[in-house]
Amino acid sequence: MKQIPQHIAIIMDGNGRWAKKRFLPRVAGHVKGVNALKKIVTHCNDLGVKYLTVFAFGRENWNRPQDEVSFLMRLILKRLNKELDELHSKNAQIKFIGDRSRINSELLASVLAAEDKTRQNTGLNFSICLDYSGQYDIVQAVNRIIAENPETPVTEEILSQYLLTDGIPNPELVIRTSGESRISNFMLWQLAYSELYFTNIYWPDFSPAELEGAIEWYNNRERRFGKISEQI
Ligand code: FPP
């Protein structure tokens, strides 16, 4: 019997290179990337994955050409609006994780509406990291702790509760596509004991079969959490 991780987190990388290889504009890779994401969300839901978190737009991504940034924001808005009813009918709960202050008002309104509509759902928890970075998450947590409890010593438990991922268990499995073996400022605190799976496949080509391969790989890992191996 295959063990399905409770929480899978994904760094969807390689859209630009996927497009370049085909002499297409970078944004064509992003369009294909969202199509790939749709299949992965559906498959996670079918497999009974409880939490799926994807890195859609990092804080450093604002430095990309303005055209590409605007395209990505419009794409996220368009697909969110298009997929919302289906996700809701599948009992999925949608959450956006990141700094909401720089997101344009139209997208922000859709984000809030999607979260509101799906808040009571009990199926797949689908979190989309938008204007997010792991360092930002820790800093905003620390600032809120200082503001609210200046006298109380900070513990790991308290800090975890102030992270934007509060209520979401840490990922057991992290997948990064496109051959890069980096965390790139993703969930730095939350990945402390995650298994990291790197594949050369560009994100637009990452299929449900590839996801199953990653889960298979995860099943062959021995998670020790700092303890010694039981096999020795
Ligand atoms: C990385 O490829 C991909 C991104 C920065 C964007 C990923 C976003 C999506 C797939 C859209 C998400 C949509 C919704 C609705 C959540 P890259 O551009 O860094 O590729 P490269 O490294 O080959 O240049």
Image (tube, rainbow, N blue to C red):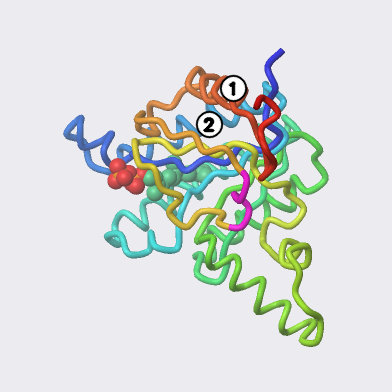
Q: Which amino acid does label 2 sit on?
A: Lys
Residue lying at the far bottom of the rendered structure = 151
User: Where does label 1 land, which residue?
Assistant: 220
The residue positioned 38% from the left and 63% from the top of the image is 62
Instruction: Please name whichever residue, 142 or 99, is drawn nearer the observer in this view of the structure.
Output: 142
> What residue is rendered at 67% in x and 61% in y?
164
Bin the neighbour count of mark 2 within 10 Å (Cα to Cα): few under 14, some 14-19, many 20 and up. few
Inspect the image, locate mark 1, and give the three-letter code of the amino acid beneath it: Asn
In the rendering, at what x and y percent does residue 223 appear?
Answer: 65, 34
Callout 1: SS: loop
Q: Which of 94 and 48 is in front in this view?
A: 48
In the image, which residues are magenta? 189-193
- Between 64 and 148, the one nearer to me in the picture: 148
Circles 2 and 1, Cβ within 8 Å, touching? The answer is: no
- Mark with earlier residue (2, 1): 2
Within 10 angstroms of label 1, few (less than 14), some, or many (20 or more) residues? few
Residue 88 in view, yes or no: no
What is the distance, in whole Å, between disc 2 and disc 1 at their CAs?
27 Å
Looking at the figure, which quarter contains the C terminus?
Answer: top right
Q: Position of residue 85 (x, y in %)?
A: 67, 36
* Ligand 1 contact, mark 1 (Cβ < 8 Å): no
Q: Name the residue under label 2.
A: 38
Relative placement, left or right, of 126 versus 175 is right
